[in-house]
Amino acid sequence: MSEGTVAKKQKLSVPFDYDKYLRPKKLPHIWCPGCGHGIVLKALLRAIEASGLNKDDICMVSGIGCSSRTPGYVDFNTMHSLHGRAFAFATGIKFAKPNMKVIVITGDGDALAIGGNHFIHTCRRNIDLTVLVYTNAIYGMTGGQYSPTTPLGDIATTSRYGNIEPPFDACKMAEAAGASFVARGTAYHTLELEKTILEAIKHKGTSVVDIIDACPTYYGRMNKYKSATHMMEVIEKDGTVSVKQADKLPPEKLEGKLLRGVLYKTDRPEYCEQYATQVMGKATGK
Amino acid sequence: MAEHKKKLLQGNEACVEGAIYAGCKFYAGYPITPSTEIAEGLSVRLPKIGGKFIQMEDEIASIAAAIGGSLAGLKSLTATSGPGFSLKQEGLGYACIAEIPLVIINVMRGGPSTGYPTGPSQADIMQAKWGTHGDHPAIALTPAYVQEILTETVRAFNLSEKYRTPVIVLYDEIIGHMREPITIPEPGELEVIDREKVTCPPDEYFPYDERFEVPPLAPFGTGYRYHVTGLNHKKDGFPTNDSKQINENNLRIMRKIENHKAEIWKNEEVSLKDADVAVFSIGSTARSANFAVKAAREAGIKAGLLRPLTIWPFPDAAVKELAKRVKAIIVPELNLGQMVLEVERCAGGACKVEGIHRVDGEPITPAQILEIIKKHAK
């Protein structure tokens, strides 16, 4: 389906200049055919355009993994940091320069395994970071090992007999840890994802968007999905329900499905503001 | 006025004074004995001067946040001790390859592992050089007096900004917690080097421009949109698989330090000119060595002390020269033999080299050193 057809069907008439935000010389990207990361990037760039932010004021920090290669392709202040540590690097940048919009790009392994503690404490501080967790249930960069979101029983190169570790729910953890904005989207629901990311960017405080995405190359092949689109339909389309639909559905229809949309939103003091008013205020006697 | 500048401070408090003097505006740390007083002090001082203090969730996050603060343009510091220094190695390597200025204080305690948290040690000397994986440049400074902790902290910031690299300050628990009267220098009294400002237009800016030995670093958010990565990269900061560029990337970060060793080295010499027996020592052990050398001189032995304030890059030239004109170099150190290996390497058999080692959490005494000086003076 061409870009034009999509636009017509979804009543989107605005032509979009992606090159404004990309580093065209750094393309093509490293992502495999069928990977959803490019779709998420599109949604993110459109959300950034809608936010009206200036490129000079945007900082994008990632960890290590497939999704963490995103900062290399976008024309912002970009940092490809250490595995799991993007939250901490981003915290340093944001805290040093609170006027910058700092976006963290991370994967499920990066954010929830090796970076789990940083994830929790970022949410607890409620520092103004927009966190996008690309959840594809696998370590793609290293060739398909099970991750903290791999479903029970699924196959990976390190769980040939079926995964016995229960998966994490990044949204539940973010909310419990104190993030003031928690949402979920998928690479399948592109327009909804764009709106969700925009809302996350606009929110003041730690905003976490868990983005369900598919890795056809490793996860898909090992778990007998027929194609990338088949994966998107089964995992992203049929495997999720929007929060609005969920209200109308009986519990049995929701079983095994992940909720999409803004799952939690509250106003809570933001870290950098607290530091400026409470700490610096008291220290300087103002 | 002069009286107000005098203070009775412990080493860690002097470190705080040094950081403030150097213009440090960002601290991220995690509580750990015996360096915690640095965090405590800066948590009070930094917010008064518009600086940022944050206690992170762990040591790894602390160095990462400090690197982030530095990349955003603030002079940044993190402080720790043994186990925390082990954890910080990951971030240290990142700061080396990404060439982000940063100062790391390591107040050395007994190890390995949790070891002896309240006891002194000098066992992280090799770790300061080789702790993080891969070949990388290392600058480590070794003050021995409370006053020197202040001045060497300032020098650490200067070197870090000048060479765009992390700089480590190593001192043992004894001087970290010892109180001595010190003088707080007036503004302008000590040199303070600030980061070189980028003046070229953004489209001509390359964060790793090989035309410079040390390319200037534009802070994030100042209109210079570029990429930073821990992967081997080209001059524009983007990763590369090109073997020539990988090689150049790895060699340049070494070269910028190697070519300036003479400016980074700093040694104190005590009665060394006519010495027959020399002691090579740092930190609290050098203080004992100082007493031992004086006692030896009183006993008619021509003893001297070479005390490096820069342990990395290792003072090769000074030790090579010394080895040619003394009978022996004695290396007392609070570990089982680290600096002594470097001294042996530099001496190259030109004189005898003998280590004095202690890992029981107690300092090496002047008497212990004097005994070995006497042995070699015969």
Image (tube, coloured by chain):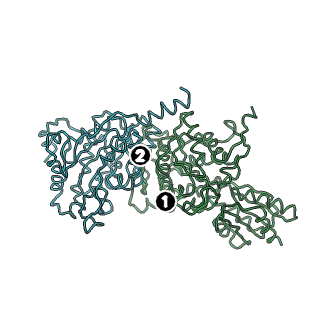
- Indicate the colour of chain A: cyan
The subunit carrying tag 2 is A
Q: Residues within 10 Å of mark 1 (few under 14, many from 20)?
A: some
Left/right of residue A96 with respect to residue A80 in the rendered view: right
Left/right of residue A84 with respect to residue B318 in the rendered view: left
Q: Nearer the viewer, mark 2 or mark 1?
A: 2
The subunit carrying tag 1 is B
Q: Name the residue nearer the viewer: A17 or A145.
A: A145
Examine the image and state in which quarter residue B243 appears: bottom left
Question: Dot 1: what SS?
Answer: helix
Q: Position of residue B84 (x, y in %)?
A: 53, 55
Q: Name the residue nearer the viewer: B163 or B37.
A: B37
The residue under label 1 is which amino acid type? Asn
Q: Residues within 10 Å of mark 2 (few under 14, many from 20)?
A: many
Q: Position of residue B215 (x, y in %)?
A: 51, 48
Residue carrying label 1: B250
The residue under label 2 is which amino acid type? His
Residue B1 sits above or below residue B229 on the image? above
Q: Position of residue A233 (x, y in %)?
A: 15, 52
Q: Residue at x 17, y 48 (%)?
A: A254
Q: Position of residue A59 (x, y in %)?
A: 39, 42
Q: Are marks 2 and 1 on the same chain?
A: no
Q: Which chain is green?
A: B
Question: Dot 2: what SS?
Answer: helix
Residue carrying label 2: A121
Examine the image and state in which quarter residue A52 appears: top left
Left/right of residue B53 with respect to residue A52 in the rendered view: right
Residue B337 sits above or below residue B268 on the image? below
Mark on residue B262? Answer: none
Q: Name the residue nearer the viewer: B141 or B160.
A: B141
